[in-house]
């Protein structure tokens, strides 16, 4: 089979197309014929060498495909079933536990899914939503589950509340779609007026160009009768938090899910304390949460926004396109027939 491997020290020029042996499922495992994957910022950090991993690592944390073979004792799936991966194969339900979450991340601390056939425990997969293509399903395990957990698990979003989403990446667009389906209002930010109009078409109630409006947090708060938004899905990290806090109402909720402005930095604690804001760090979610999200997607009819798809062999070009920040929504890899 074909597989992509990342050679040390990392970098998009270190992604190599190789031949590998077809994996055989052991007890409790399934083998999946991979059909599609999707790019996440985490995958980019690994591929670019910013998140170091082992030499020869197969990248990519998301995959969708059909079950080809099952090992002894498998009860959840049978050959022919359509499945997608989970980001944390060992986190099935309940509270996150560091050792379970980070010990076995595909494409990072374990072999990933940039290969034509992949094996993992049956509990490392869930069914895909009815009516979804493999490419559509491949966009869900990281980005959509993150948005779901931010809004409904940690945020306990209610109809009529207001959500602030930032930018036009996968998590932000899923958050917009999910929030609107739940009866919430959405304020969306971007530096591109063209992209803002596309967000309006997806249902955004208010639009803010953050380059034209540097104090976009205050501008967002001014749009809310309650004096601020109920929820912020913050993809920027430390450089964004002052504005995210400014956008919040008293006792508002900020889901910190991104590090686009850096891995560490100042937190405006006085503002956080005065407003009594709840700041929650989030990294994707559990298998149980993914299954809940699948049910919600089927009930609402939400479909992912896919910008562009690349063949598996062009994975480096796909990451370069992601790097350009020209995309709107998700970028996929297609593994062919």
Image (cartoon, rainbow, N blue to C red):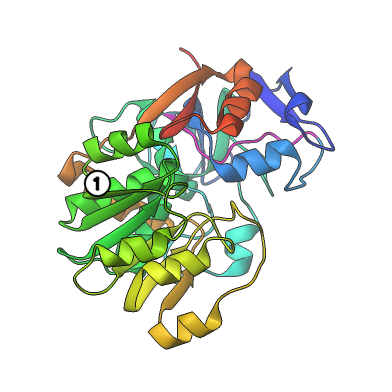
- Indicate whether 5 appears above or below 104: above
Q: Nearer the viewer, residue 268 or 42?
A: 268
Q: Residues within 10 Å of mark 1 (few under 14, many from 20)?
A: many
Q: Nearer the viewer, residue 4 or 48?
A: 48
SS for dot 1: loop
Position of 317 compared to 48: left or right?
Answer: left
Position of 135 compared to 14: left or right?
Answer: left
| Residue 314 sits in quarter | top right
- Main SS type for the magenta part? loop
- Residue 276: tell me if it is visible: no
- Indicate whether 59 appears above or below 218: above
Q: Is residue 57 magenta?
A: yes
Position of 318 compared to 173: left or right?
Answer: right
In the rendered image, the residue lying farthest to the top is: 337
Return the residue at label 1: 204
> Residue at (61%, 50%) from the top-left corner?
105
| Residue 17 x/y as whole percent | 71, 18
Residue range (magenta): 56-65
Image quarter (top left, top right, bottom left or bottom right) of the N terminus: top right
- Residue 185: tell me if it is visible: yes
| Residue 119 x/y as whole percent | 57, 36
> Residue at (41%, 26%) from the top-left corner?
307
| Residue 203 sits in quarter | top left
| Residue 26 sits in quarter | top right
């Amino acid at each position: 089979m074909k597989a992509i491997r990342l050679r040390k020290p990392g970098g998009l020029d270190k992604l190599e197309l190789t031949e590998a042996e077809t994996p055989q499922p052991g007890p409790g495992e399934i083998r999946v014929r991979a059909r599609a994957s999707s790019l996440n910022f985490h995958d980019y950090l690994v591929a670019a060498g910013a998140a170091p991993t082992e030499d020869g690592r197969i990248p990519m944390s998301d995959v969708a495909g059909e079950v080809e073979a099952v090992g002894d004792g498998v009860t959840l799936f049978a050959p022919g079933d359509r499945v997608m991966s989970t980001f944390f194969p060992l986190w099935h339900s309940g509270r996150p536990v560091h050792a379970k979450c980070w010990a076995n991340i595909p494409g990072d601390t374990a072999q990933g899914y940039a290969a034509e056939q992949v094996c993992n425990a049956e509990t490392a997969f869930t069914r895909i939503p009815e009516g979804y293509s493999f490419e559509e399903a491949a966009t869900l395990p990281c980005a959509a589950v993150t948005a779901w957990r931010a809004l409904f698990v940690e945020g306990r979003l209610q109809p009529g509340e207001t959500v602030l989403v930032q930018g036009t990446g996968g998590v932000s667009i899923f958050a917009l779609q999910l929030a609107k389906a739940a009866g919430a209002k959405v304020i969306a930010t971007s530096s591109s007026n063209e992209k803002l109009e596309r967000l309006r078409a997806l249902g955004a109630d208010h639009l803010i160009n953050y380059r034209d409006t540097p104090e976009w947090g205050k501008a967002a708060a001014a749009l809310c009768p309650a004096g601020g938004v109920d929820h912020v899905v913050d993809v920027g990290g430390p450089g964004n938090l002052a504005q995210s806090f400014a956008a919040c109402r008293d006792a508002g909720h900020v889901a910190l899910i991104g590090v686009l402005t850096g891995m560490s930095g100042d937190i405006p604690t006085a503002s956080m304390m005065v407003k009594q804001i709840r700041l929650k760090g989030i990294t994707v979610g559990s298998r149980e949460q993914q299954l809940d999200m699948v049910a919600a997607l089927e009930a609402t009819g939400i479909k992912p926004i896919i910008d562009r798809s690349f063949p598996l062999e062009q994975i480096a070009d796909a990451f370069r396109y992601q790097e350009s920040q020209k995309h709107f929504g998700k970028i996929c890899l297609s593994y062919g027939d």
